[in-house]
Image (cartoon, rainbow, N blue to C red):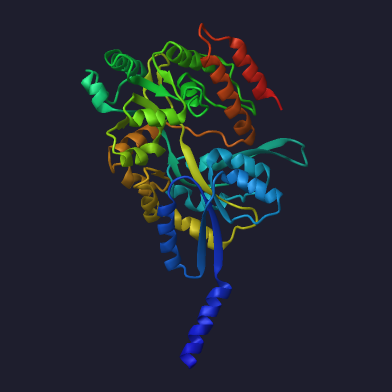
Amino acid sequence: MKKVLIILLLLISLVVFSKNIIVWFEYEGMEQMNNIIKEFEKENPDITIQLVEQKKIVSKVLNTYRGGGELPDIILIKNDEIGILTDSNLIENVDNFKDEMGDSFIDKAFDAFSVEKSIINNESNNFRKEKHYYGVPFYFDTQVLYYHDKIFYDNGFPLDEGLTFEDLLFASYVVEDKSKGKIMGLAWGANSPYWFPPFQWAFGKENLMEDGRIIVNDDETYKAIDFIFKNIVGKSAHWLERQGLIAGFKRGKIASMFFGTFMIPDFIKSGIEFKILPLPYIEEAGNYMTPILDYKGFSIIKGKKTPEIEKFIKYILDKKSQIEFCKDLYKFPVNKEAFNILKDKDEYFKVAYESARIGKTMPTSAYFKSKYWQGVRTMMTLILKQKEGYDGEIVEKAQEFMDGK
């Protein structure tokens, strides 16, 4: 009887003192994350993790907060959405994670979640800049060239590392010519803000945001626009939206395309034969297309930073958990040890890491997010619909939009 009473008291204490952590999760990897959570709960029976699949997390957080609803403890977030929530004072500073774990992460991973703010000195009335971190990086995707090796090989122009953009255009022309236009040689979302920075950076643009301004009417950006325009409107390459790209590539109607690495598992599962290469060198620019590193990480909702939550985040960032999550999803880990193990796993990992080696991240500013994405998409859509050269007034109007409040 005494033994039963002791067990009962232990069970009651676990219920009373156990910590329940709610995590909102998006994108791929629910199954992998659930497996990691099960292992964590085995090792920490006093902590329960509730994983909730939630679409459009940032919008949901903002709407829930405004409506007085219950917010989660942790959210998965893209690095370029950090500024929206810091401006609303809804997520915690996680500088301590950077101090404690920064050395075990790949270079610049934490910088993807940094926010720089101007702080006024009350005594001198001068401003100083301070950088703080509001998300702990988890993994990243990047951008690559997908291609059907057999199509190019059968047409006498097999692709390999070291090809230039100009080489790719010529090989694509041959594919289209020999197929009598039934196969597109090269396509990408040419009006997409996601695909504009790789060309801006290639043509010498250093920063997408400078001194609080988004500048799109500078020489480097004009050169990038000229290059995209002459290849798309000149029909050396094709402009397609996302779903058209995926469907066309799967059916073999598109020989090559620029796309994100997150599609690798889906293409493998579909059973199609494909290869990938890093984004190519552009001879005209004298530089490589520079891929975006699309980081996802965990932010802690304001007021919910506890030792249990810190323990859980550290657990999912150790080598074992990172490999468990990333290896089959073709995500790229931020843990340095996991990164070095997976980078040689297969050809897909090798190529994606080479592509990511020179990659850059998008700014975290909420102002950038609200302006750049809408402004660039509108600008490039209008430009690519022109037939006989584009009107520079379109770019100048886009600049006015970027500068507007």
Percent of width and height locating residue 345? 28, 43
The answer to whether residue 335 is left or right of residue 179 is right
Residue at horizontal 24 percent and vertical 19 percent from the top = 157
Q: In the figure, residue 242 lies in which quadrant?
A: top left
The answer to whether residue 267 is left or right of residue 188 is left
Return the residue found at the far bottom: 1
Residue at horizontal 48 percent and vertical 93 percent from the top = 1
Percent of width and height locating residue 312? 49, 59
120 or 89, which is in the foreground? 89
Residue at horizontal 55 percent and vertical 58 percent from the top = 22
248 or 235, which is in the foreground? 248
Determine if residue 365 is in view. yes
Q: In the figure, residue 271 lies in which quadrant?
A: top left
Q: In the figure, residue 376 lies in which quadrant?
A: top right
Percent of width and height locating residue 395? 60, 15
Residue 23 drawn above or below residue 82: below
